[in-house]
Image (spheres, rainbow, N blue to C red):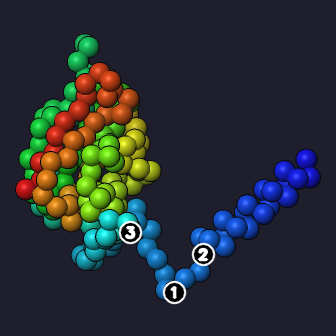
Amino acid sequence: MRFNALALVASAIVLGACSGGGEGSKTDSATAPAPGAAGTGAAATGTATAMPATGKTIEVKMIMDGNSYRFEPANITAKAGDAIKFTTESGMPHNFGFDPANIPDDVEAQLKANMPAGSTDLESPYQNAAGESHTLSLGGIKPGKYEFHCTPHLALGMKGVLTVE
């Protein structure tokens, strides 16, 4: 019992030492910048600052209708700087996420930073209840095709493709 307590205390000390210090202050990568603030992208291995949407907002419904689970529309074309607003219409819970293995390294950090508040990762960030919406900013996202899905309903074919121009 004493060994477990000692191991727990030692682990806490090591983790605390690794997480603090350094020069200057760091910004949490999930925190959005203040309105009008300029965000910065990041290298593939670094972090990024959330970039606000500066273009139009595209509405996407998350629907369960009988045995059909789908995004409507499932194929989205947007410009860098646009926003995608995902709203649960029926068949909750839903979310939208990305398979990190299918996201280029030089896009992953910015995409993570731009995920809605409360998101913990790209693949399964949160759950939407009926009527709830979450918005993804495409600020700083380079052109390309990005497959997305609803994690709870992926096996049922609830997926789509986001094309950023």
Q: Pointer 1: residues within 10 angstroms few (<14), some, or many (20+)?
A: few
Quarter-wise, where is residue 33 in the image? Answer: bottom left
Relative to 145, 86 lies left or right:
right
Res. 75 mark: none
> Given contact means CB atoms under 8 Å apart, are the residues at marks 2 and 3 in contact?
no
Taking the spot 25% from the left edge, 55% from the top edge, the residue there is 104
> Given contact means CB atoms under 8 Å apart, are the residues at marks 3 and 1 in contact?
no
Q: Secondary structure at mark 3?
A: loop
Whether 144 is drawn above or below 139: the answer is above
Q: Secondary structure at mark 1?
A: loop
Q: How far apart are the alpha carbons under marks 2 and 3?
A: 17 Å
Q: Pointer 3: residues within 10 angstroms few (<14), some, or many (20+)?
A: few
Res. 23 mark: 1
Residue where numbered disc 2 is placed: 20
Q: Position of residue 147 (x, y in %)?
A: 21, 41
Q: From the image, which quarter does the C terminus lie in? A: bottom left
Taking the spot 91% from the left edge, 47% from the top edge, the residue there is 1
Q: Position of residue 31 (x, y in %)?
A: 40, 65
Relative to 143, 131 lies left or right:
right
